[in-house]
Image (cartoon, rainbow, N blue to C red):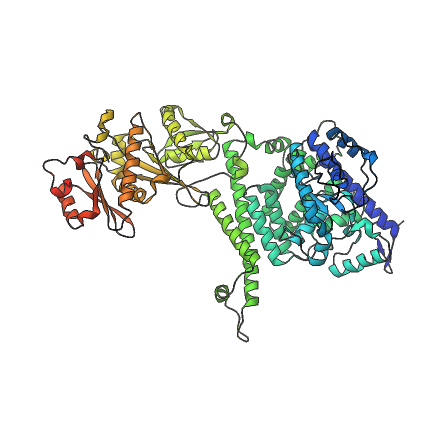
Amino acid sequence: MIHPARPLLDGDEVDGRVLSAIVGQFRAHHGLRLRATLRRLPARARLALRTVALLLHRNHPALPGYLGSDTPAGIDGYRPPPETLSAARRLHPGYQESRYGRPQASLQSLFIMGSGGSLAQTRTSDVDLWVCCDRLLHPSLMPKLRQIDAWAATQGLTLHSFLVDPAQLATEGQLPGTRTPGLLLDEFYRTATLVAGRYPLWWLIPATDGDSYRHLAARLLEQRFVASDQVLDFGPVPPFPREELAHAAVTELNRALETPHKSLLKLMLVQAYAEAPGDPISSTTYKQRIHTGERDPLRLDPYLLLHEHVEGHLRRHGRTDQLLLARRLLVRKTADNAAPASTRSPEHPHRRLLARFHDWGFSTAEIAHLRRPDSWSVSELMREHQALTGALADGLACAESLATARNQAARARRSPTAAGTPVDAPAVASGTQLTPLAWLNDMHLRRARFQLARLLATPDGAIAQLHPALRERGQAAARWPAATLHRSADGWLLSDGTEIVLRPPRLLGAVAWAQLNQIRLLTSADLVHLQPRIAQIRQGLSDTGAGIRAFVNAEVQAPRQLARATGVAESDRILLSQRRDPLDYSGLHLLHLESIDLLRQTADGCWQLTSFSGAGGLIEALELLSREDPAETTWHVIGGRERFAFAQRLETLQREAHLVLGTPGATFVLPFGSSALTLHNDGLRVVGRRHDDPGELHLHLSGLSQAAVRFDSHSSRFAQPDPGATPAAGA
């Protein structure tokens, strides 16, 4: 009996029986994958996926995607099975297969690529479909594929179809739409599921060396051990160029900023490939196991193969501290398929996956809890966030290392050097240009740095945001996890009942953090009176049409506490408001401006809070706001009914100051409690200066051009100056 691992025998002979056994082994496993893919889909989507091969095999007006009888159709060697015809009749009663003969085959094969049929597939997973044919057919086939994808969406199936020419990848090492063809081919061989048509010649060739592969492939075809119309050849997986690894690392890093668990695992695989280029790659391990007769679905599962490669690499390189992270990423990605029904046998793959997780220290209750992040407490979300951001930071370091090494090598090759003199790296960097791919990597790395800074809240005053995978839970607000607000000695704190999750210095920061992260904000018993104030802050946060949200008096401090804390006298807190202010008609006599909190979103998506209080801080805020476009600023005054009139007063003041101070050398004068404030554009910035008596103000203004000075036209003090005021102050 010949062992199926040896299709190539001693003496360079080929055994046809072994080749047939290997093909049968692969087909059996791909059949299992296809059935698993269908089983995990909703009923309507399952019917749609069953019919996709038929839609490409036949051109018929009753079938979706029909563009005319001249559209390329027909898949090599494909005969629709009864279950496909039954699904087609249920979805498209007007189709009758028996009326049509066998079409001329234009298409070579159909594969499902990616997580389909693996333990990572869920009911909502996308399905990526590779339609293999000559590239000359792509223009006429693309409209048909787009129509089929659109029809599949109406059936609840998210289908993404791609046209692939195997010869282009085998002979040119290129595949349109990807900059990492080698890594993509490795993934294809490890994860693809044959739906219809020819099988890959790669299945039959045990050699991993490119030259050996091509030699044996030629022998199999030339000596007709394999019929050429039964196979297609993508070629062997080539050694991964450094630039390709760098691009893959940067790509997975950016994907991990949105969908972390799969992308971080793939990033760890790229890192393992880069650090140990001599080790067998994951697709080679898969093929070797098939050749040795392996039938265990767990040992052939694409995601478990990926994890095994990563874990083996971590162990060999002494990085056992990262094992727990890799295992937790896999558990989170595959936990939906580790929930066995009571009727399943102990040998069912899902039962055995659960047993493996138990061996790693994950209890059944913990795995069930991991499947439901919408039920986690705030402290659990925070811990998961810290683990993910830590892994992202490690991934960023890996991607930067790969990209930097690749760029330096490229620059060194382009830069002339004196005989025997090494190239100075900074000189090389300044004297050469990056390749388009290296430039793209640098651009994506900058984006990743910005996004990670947002998640880590590293900029000063930034409001931390949970990873999007933890924030976008799709729940109604009433079901958001809750945190309770408490006062602390130096500000505020938020607790979920078991742990303190945040210590924001400002109330606005606490409310904004909860709203941005979909956290339900409660108040402790002694802070129930703050709920109306918090509701007003939330209303201001919901204003999406502003670049800057200016919150006035959002912080909670009694007047005496504020005076003690900031050293500001009661009279100085009556800023911008006088007893004879035009706003008096509303019945308001004193409008206290105690603090200004500015909330803005930066270009990289980070929410930043800047707070101002005390006389010096408020002057700084007025300096800043006079330079900002009033159309991009919204004012939100926290308080009683007078807050609307106060907000209108501040909006008007900002518009007037911004208009005046747009000219270099201009000065704007406004009341500042019992004093006056001048804002002066010195050509570079706006500088504020406080004047405590009219004489001081007059002396300051006497050195300025009268045409360049403007007064707050809405202030009663300047409109109707006191008899004792100097001419300059009342001008």
> Vertical placement of 328 versus 246: above or below?
above
Tell me the residue at 83%/34% (across/down).
98
The quarter of the image holding the C terminus is top left
Which residue is at the front of the view, 107 or 3? 107
Q: Nearer the viewer, residue 236 or 543?
A: 543
Quarter-wise, where is residue 325 in the image?
Answer: top right
Q: Residue furthest right?
A: 1
Q: Position of residue 613 (x, y in %)?
A: 29, 38
Which residue occupies 21% across, 48% down?
708
Q: Position of residue 421 (x, y in %)?
A: 53, 73
> Is residue 120 shown to the viewer in this render?
no
Q: Nearer the viewer, residue 542 or 76?
A: 76
Query: Which one is in front, 694 or 355?
Result: 694
Judged left or right of residue 329, residue 689 is left
Q: Give residue 544's position: percent from left, percent from top.
A: 43, 35
Q: Establish if 723 lies above or below 266.
A: above
In this rendering, would 322 be left or right of 712? right
Vertical relation: 535 (above or below) 423 = above
Count of numbered tags: 0
Residue 560 visible: yes
